[in-house]
Image: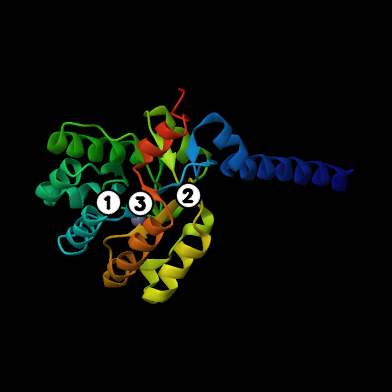
Amino acid sequence: MKSLVWKIGLFIILIFCIAYASSAMDKGRPYYEKRGYVLWDIQTEEKIIALTFDDGPHSTYTTQILDLLAQYNAKATFFVIGERAENMPDLILKLGQEGHEIANHTYTHPYKITPEKLEDELKKTNEIIHDITGTYPLYYRPVGGTYDDRIINTAVENGYRVVMWSWHQDTEDWKSPGVDKIVSTVLSGAKPGNIVLFHDAGGDRSQTVKALEEILPKLQAQGYEFVTISELLEITSMSLKN
Ligand SMILES: [Zn+2]
């Protein structure tokens, strides 16, 4: 009898553990994508690509990248860190004036965050960007690309669309893998509607800048146009429905 009670007790504990584990997990790409909560890339015939830059702004690298983008009439999206943006308002202003999109990458770039803290960091960064540019960002990218249900729900409830990147377009430039490696990752996988992940701060990003010097003319020669996330959604008529 005693052992039966033990077994029932253990079974109940097991059920609770499973329920807790599944609630902490994410629902998967099809679920989020269908509802328009999260964007990875777009299926389209249009030869458009969205270049995205995380962790900036940076006085050297972001400026160099802006010069290159201007040279190729390319527009990009910058997922900036709020506390960096706060210290470099002129650069944020320049990003906006040159037609690039500014998006939210939290205030302090924490790798682990509670929903309450995330809400706080998103709002803080939002206000900083709005104070400088007069425009509120629409998109948020989780730090390290790490997300779960709670992270996505918090972002969506606060009016953001979560923007990831095409999985085959992760340049891993933060590891400084070599200019050739960054170039080949982007060029070999380039398809219409791709979202490419670069970093313009957080370390030595000279390889990112050098890689762009090759990537931009080569993709342009293939007929690609470089657009912001909003333009990507607009052109493909997949704008946020909620
Ligand atoms: Zn980041």
Left/right of residue 204 with respect to residue 193 in the rendered view: left
Left/right of residue 74 with respect to residue 163 in the rendered view: left
Which residue bears the numbered disc 2?
Answer: 194
Q: Of label 2 and label 1, which has the lower sequence position?
A: 1
Residue 200 lies, in percent from the top left, at 28, 60
Which residue bears the numbered disc 3?
Answer: 52
As shown in the figure, which amino acid type bears the numbered disc 1?
Thr
Residue 166 lies, in percent from the top left, at 50, 52
Nearest to viewer (mark 3 / mark 2): 2
Q: In the figure, 99 relative to 205: above or below?
A: above
Residue 123 lies, in percent from the top left, at 27, 35
Q: Which mark is residue 202?
A: none
Q: Residue at x 48, y 45 (%)?
A: 193
Residue 207, located in which quarter of the rendered image? bottom left
What distance separates the C-alpha of mark 3 from that of mark 2? 10 Å
Outermost residue toward the right? 1
Quarter of the image that includes the C terminus: top left
Q: Of label 3 and label 1, which has the lower sequence position?
A: 3
